[in-house]
Amino acid sequence: MRNHFSLVVWARLVSGQLHRLSSSIAIDEITTGAPLESFVSYSIEFSSFPDFAGTKASPNGFSSTLLNNLGYLQGSNPYIRVGGNTQDYAIYDANESLPLRGIFNTSRSSDYPTTITIGPTFFEAYNTWPKVKFSHGFNLGGNNDGRVLETLNQTVPLACKALSNGNLYAWEYGNEPDLFATSAQGPVRPANYNESDFVNEWLKGTRTIKDLLKESCPDLLGNDTYEYLAPSFAGTNNHLKAPLAWSDGLSTDGNIKYFSSHNYISGATSLGVTLQGTLMNHTRTKQSVDAHVTEYNAIKPGVPHIFGETNSLYNQGRPGLSNTFGAALWVVDFMLYSASVNIQRVHMHMGTNYRYQSWQPITTNSTSIGTKAPYYGNIAVAAFLGNLNVQPVRVANFDTGGGDHEAAYLSYVDGVLSRIMVINMNEYNYTLNGTGPGLNPAARPLRTYSFSVGNLTGEASVQRLYANGSDAITGVTWDGWSYNYELDAGRPVRLTNVTIGEKVPITDGIVEVGVADSSAVILSLLV
Ligand SMILES: *[C@@H]1O[C@H](CO)[C@@H](O)[C@H](O)[C@H]1NC(C)=O
Ligand SMILES: *[C@@H]1O[C@H](CO)[C@@H](O)[C@H](O)[C@H]1NC(C)=O
Ligand SMILES: *[C@@H]1O[C@H](CO)[C@@H](O)[C@H](O)[C@H]1NC(C)=O
Ligand SMILES: *[C@@H]1O[C@H](CO)[C@@H](O)[C@H](O)[C@H]1NC(C)=O
Ligand SMILES: *[C@@H]1O[C@H](CO)[C@@H](O)[C@H](O)[C@H]1NC(C)=O
Ligand SMILES: *[C@@H]1O[C@H](CO)[C@@H](O)[C@H](O)[C@H]1NC(C)=O
Ligand SMILES: *[C@@H]1O[C@H](CO)[C@@H](O)[C@H](O)[C@H]1NC(C)=O
Ligand SMILES: *[C@@H]1O[C@H](CO)[C@@H](O)[C@H](O)[C@H]1NC(C)=O
Ligand SMILES: *[C@@H]1O[C@H](CO)[C@@H](O)[C@H](O)[C@H]1NC(C)=O
Ligand SMILES: *[C@@H]1O[C@H](CO)[C@@H](O)[C@H](O)[C@H]1NC(C)=O
Ligand SMILES: *[C@@H]1O[C@H](CO)[C@@H](O)[C@H](O)[C@H]1NC(C)=O
Ligand SMILES: *[C@@H]1O[C@H](CO)[C@@H](O)[C@H](O)[C@H]1NC(C)=O
């Protein structure tokens, strides 16, 4: 990589005066991360996968379109991790005629079934979306069902055949085993279950998987195909600790190719959770992500660090928060902060009817099919990174001096600054004072951001992530594009009521852009 000294100066325009808040930073002085291909990826709840993917006879084309939109921007389609709590409930039944039959027990969860049988057609879903790679999650937790090892033996051949068309990303064995002894959905291991117990089970099970692959899918045993996401722990401070799992030998077989962590910022029903204080809060996001970086650095697993399952508020999100445009701004801050500290791929979790989902794949009693606000955050991140397969970037977080409610990110191509993302997370709730005749919201504050960009000249182009306010759950656009279902089933449609094609001059090495409260902007310099 060329070691260009790219000068970036942050300054804030206060009543016409340029106040420099920090002098300069250089690419070789700041921490940058290198996102992998398909950085914007998803995790789909195992029990919801048939809804998202559809069947061989009737693939879910809406989901496919939304994945392709991201592929167009970032150079390859999102990778899909199929897993979550329900992967550890799935029991195979060769006679099951449905892909998946789920029974709800609302005292365990009202969002997903907690008794699940899958049939042979479950695996068809892996061949519904072209150009998408998947990880399949095998059942380790077992749900206190004696058929779990038999299920492993029965499902490996089916999963591997379905994933033999260049569509395999990795395997996963068990979801959040650090909670097996303590799970709120019902413990599946004794209270004294420890890291050595987990490592023994994991090694035994993955060796069984390997033996079964030798028989059924020997082509998938190459170094670049036989891979696991692990340890898939829920957090850094639960009943099991990842550093102990590593020192107890989890990586003995050399098959863990991604150190996969899970993260949520807080919980859907946790006290004190607000949009401004919890999600539209860069300080909170940074703290949440940094704990994982500390853990990873302590282990030094020698493989990329990814978020294999993550989203805003655990327990599937809270309506009015996780499904708002403010949450889309959180998505941008969270994903790019993760990229800047070298978490190299981020799988945003979703399931049918979940409040934090990027899209709802089908219409149900509670939720209509549609593109949800967080998807627009995914789109803005993909656009900011660009085609990672053709032009890899490095990403840096940049302290704007704006406190909890602002964040900026720099993207470098070959060490040269190419794009700047500014996220203005100051809350603008447009329905706060009511809507309707005679009730007009107060003017939306606009903050001006100025950057010194060295000796660049000419113009920078401006693309905006926009909606009426942080509380909007619809009417979101990125650069004037809507991906809403009701317009063209998720294909991009350019709206006419949003400004596009903006350019700002670079004058004496300074570029300046106005960003409305509760919105984000991408400045592209090398145009
Ligand atoms: C599946 O159906 C066959 C034929 O009816 C039966 O013999 C077998 O026991 C069934 N298997 C299971 C797992 O129920
Ligand atoms: C539902 O879950 C609760 C809590 O785990 C359990 O006590 C109850 O027996 C379950 N009900 C059924 C019908 O399985
Ligand atoms: C699963 O298959 C392995 C061999 O691949 C065998 O040793 C084991 O007994 C089988 N387990 C069950 C429960 O069928
Ligand atoms: C886990 O518990 C077993 C006994 O059940 C013990 O032999 C082992 O040392 C423990 N491992 C750790 C890491 O505490
Ligand atoms: C497979 O990967 C391991 C560890 O990364 C390496 O030691 C080994 O040489 C590789 N084998 C082949 C056939 O590439
Ligand atoms: C943002 O998060 C930090 C860390 O949790 C917290 O100390 C701070 O009070 C939060 N800011 C607001 C405005 O709630
Ligand atoms: C949806 O609502 C209908 C009518 O109330 C009901 O019969 C059906 O069971 C519901 N479906 C689900 C999946 O809850
Ligand atoms: C926006 O304001 C309305 C009216 O006060 C309130 O009901 C709503 O919860 C607010 N939205 C958010 C996301 O804070
Ligand atoms: C709501 O009303 C308050 C009090 O008049 C005002 O300060 C605030 O700016 C208004 N906010 C919006 C979004 O209209
Ligand atoms: C601009 O700065 C870069 C890096 O310092 C340098 O390589 C380049 O030659 C400069 N270009 C001009 C036109 O001065
Ligand atoms: C956004 O505000 C405009 C008026 O400024 C209004 O016409 C439009 O319906 C609003 N959109 C939503 C989704 O509320
Ligand atoms: C633009 O129009 C769409 C519907 O056509 C609406 O949802 C959105 O709120 C409008 N945006 C603005 C900024 O008025």
Image (cartoon, rainbow, N blue to C red):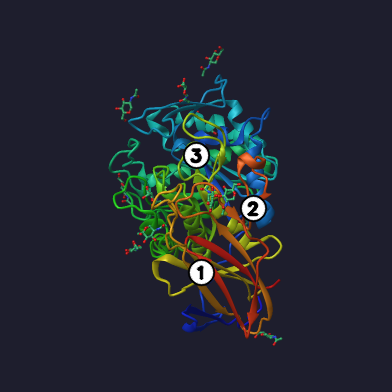
CA separation, marks 3 and 1? 30 Å
Residue drawn at 44 percent across, 56 percent down? 441
Residue beneath disc 2: 481
Q: Amino acid at mark 2?
A: Trp
Residue drawn at 47 percent across, 83 percent down? 19
**Other-residue count near label 3 (Cα within 10 Å), few / some / many at <14 / 14–19 / ≥20:** many
Rendered location of residue 2, percent (x, y) = 66, 78
Residue drawn at 64 percent across, 35 percent down? 60
Q: Quadrant of residue 508?
A: bottom right
Residue beneath disc 1: 408
Between 50 and 370, which is closer to the camera in this rendering? 370
Q: Amino acid at mark 3?
A: Gly
Mark 3 against mark 1, which lies toward the viewer?
Answer: 1
Rendered location of residue 442, percent (x, y) = 43, 60
Residue beneath disc 3: 351
Helix, strand, or loop for circle 1?
strand
Which numbered disc, 3 or 2, marks the residue that appears first in the sequence?
Answer: 3
Helix, strand, or loop for circle 3?
loop
**Other-residue count near label 2 (Cα within 10 Å), few / some / many at <14 / 14–19 / ≥20:** some
Query: Taking the image as drawn, is residue 223 in sight?
Result: no
Q: Amino acid at mark 1?
A: Ala
Rendered location of residue 300, percent (x, y) = 47, 64
Please state if 522 lies on the left or on the right of 114 as rendered. Answer: right
CA separation, marks 3 and 2? 25 Å
Q: Quadrant of residue 291?
A: bottom left
Mark 3 against mark 2, which lies toward the viewer?
Answer: 2
Which numbered disc, 2 or 1, marks the residue that appears first in the sequence?
Answer: 1
CA separation, marks 2 and 1? 22 Å
Helix, strand, or loop for circle 2?
strand
